[in-house]
């Protein structure tokens, strides 16, 4: 995989990630996939590597890095190893940034060391049965009781919701002139009375990613568990969307690159009609076309990574990258599965899992249809 991350430190981190994923994760991955969840203790091991806390300040036990390149490398190596680590990316790249940006010193002291070590895993509860990409439609409420809030509502499709020890819950605390006014974010301990989890949802792909229904029935949340200021939740959510959507784009780009590499090896060894599948012109043209598109995606991702590190990646530009790379992923894995023939439809072959895992990337993190409206607005439409 070609990337702008080329320093000796980046190379050393990539080797560490590759060795760990190959030796510690890949051998057990089929068992976890069958179980539908990653064992909790694995996150402790990844925390010991320093991976979970890459963006956590050093004073709270993290790496304190000011670049997203290391997280990108980890995602690339995860894809290359043909594994998936459940809610880890949401924990690292979505939840922790909210704590870093908006937690009070007391909240940061309480949670960031635990999040960096893997002692506590986090998820974020935004999506509801009637509110997905339209966050302004959230109906979960948090009634102000003075020194506490009372939380009521339900969430669904919550990544990492089964393994989570703490959940960032987006709830409505008031109404305003705009639909998105009045949303707030709360730090909810999973042990809180009134909090319960539904089933681990049975999905088409991403089988090791625990995806839960969460329920809140008169959950008392101390006022000091409010993250940031009341009513500014939508603003906070919007501010982190570029990194969240870039994370999805990076994972999709890496999956496309992995699909190409896997299929290239397969067609070289697969014999048919007295020759290899690789010998046919159609195979060469199909994989060459994939390679061209993948290079374009890589250039886009690298440009977006540089913009994110510089603090200038806009929501519209992040949307462009997410749209392109997730749709690239879909096209590439479909072509690659076709070149596997019937074997490509068997889950024992990596391309089958890559195919199943690819479909949801055009939906979560904001559906690509909704993201196109953001891009359209950015060009004056």
Image (cartoon, grey):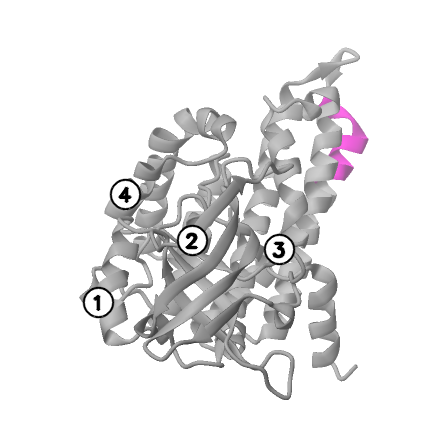
Q: State whether the magenta stretch is mostly helix, strand or loop.
A: helix
Q: Is residue 285 magenta?
A: yes
Q: Which residue is mark 2?
A: 195
Instruction: Give the CA separation, mark 2 to mark 1.
Output: 24 Å
Sequence-first disc among 3 and 1: 1
Residue 307 visible in the picture: no
- Residue annotated with mark 3: 364
Q: Nearer the viewer, mark 4 or mark 2?
A: 2
Q: Is residue 278 magenta?
A: yes
Q: Residues within 10 Å of mark 3 (few under 14, many from 20)?
A: some
Magenta segment: 277-287
Tell me if mark 2 has few (under 14), some (14-19) or many (20+) residues whose alpha carbon lies within 10 angstroms of its own: many
| Residue occupying image coordinates x 35% and y 43% | 17
**Residue depicted at 49% across the width and 41% down the height:** 210
- Tell me if mark 4 has few (under 14), some (14-19) or many (20+) residues whose alpha carbon lies within 10 angstroms of its own: many
The residue to which callout 1 is attached is: 109
Residue 262, compared with residue 99, is above or below; it is above
- Per the model, the C-alpha gap separating discs 1 and 4 is 19 Å
Q: CA gap, disc 3 to disc 4?
A: 27 Å
Does label 2 or label 3 sit earlier along the sequence? 2
Q: Which mark is residue 44?
A: 4
CA separation, marks 4 and 2? 24 Å
At a point 39% along the width and 49% down the height, the residue shown is 164
Of residues 296 and 120, the one nearer the viewer is 120
Residue 13 percent across, percent down from the top left? 32, 49
């Amino acid at each position: 995989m070609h990337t702008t991350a080329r320093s000796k430190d980046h190379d050393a981190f990539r080797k560490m990630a590759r060795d760990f994923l190959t030796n510690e994760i890949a051998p057990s991955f089929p068992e976890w996939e069958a179980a539908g969840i990653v064992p909790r203790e694995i996150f402790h091991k990844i925390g010991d590597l320093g991976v979970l806390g890459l963006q956590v300040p050093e004073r709270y036990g993290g790496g304190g890095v000011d670049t997203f390149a290391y997280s990108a490398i980890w995602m690339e190596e995860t894809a290359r190893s043909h594994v998936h680590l459940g809610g880890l990316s949401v924990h690292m790249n979505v939840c922790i940034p909210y704590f870093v940006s908006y937690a009070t010193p007391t909240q940061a002291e309480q949670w960031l060391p635990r999040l960096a070590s893997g002692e506590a895993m986090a998820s974020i509860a935004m999506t509801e049965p009637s509110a997905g990409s339209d966050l302004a439609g959230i109906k979960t409420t948090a009634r102000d009781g003075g020194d506490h809030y009372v939380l009521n509502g339900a969430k669904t499709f919550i990544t990492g919701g089964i393994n989570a020890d703490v959940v960032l819950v987006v709830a409505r605390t008031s109404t305003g002139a705009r639909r998105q006014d009045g949303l707030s974010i709360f730090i909810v301990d999973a042990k809180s009375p009134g909090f319960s989890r539904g089933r681990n949802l049975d999905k088409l792909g991403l089988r090791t990613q625990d995806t839960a229904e969460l329920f809140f029935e008169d959950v008392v949340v101390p006022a000091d568990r409010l993250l940031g200021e009341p009513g500014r939740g939508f603003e906070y959510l919007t501010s982190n969307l570029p990194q969240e959507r870039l994370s999805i784009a990076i994972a999709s780009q890496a999956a496309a690159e992995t699909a190409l590499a896997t299929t290239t090896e397969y067609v070289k060894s697969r014999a048919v009609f007295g020759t290899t599948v690789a010998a046919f012109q159609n195979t060469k043209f199909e994989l060459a076309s994939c390679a061209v598109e993948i290079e374009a995606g890589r250039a886009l991702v690298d440009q977006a990574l540089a913009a994110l590190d510089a603090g200038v990646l806009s929501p519209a530009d992040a949307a462009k990258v997410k749209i392109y790379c997730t749709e690239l992923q879909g096209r590439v894995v479909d072509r690659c599965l076709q070149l596997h023939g019937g074997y490509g439809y068997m889950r024992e072959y990596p391309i089958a899992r890559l195919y199943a895992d690819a479909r949801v990337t055009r939906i979560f993190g904001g559906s690509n249809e909704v993201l196109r409206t953001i891009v359209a607005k950015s060009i004056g439409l």
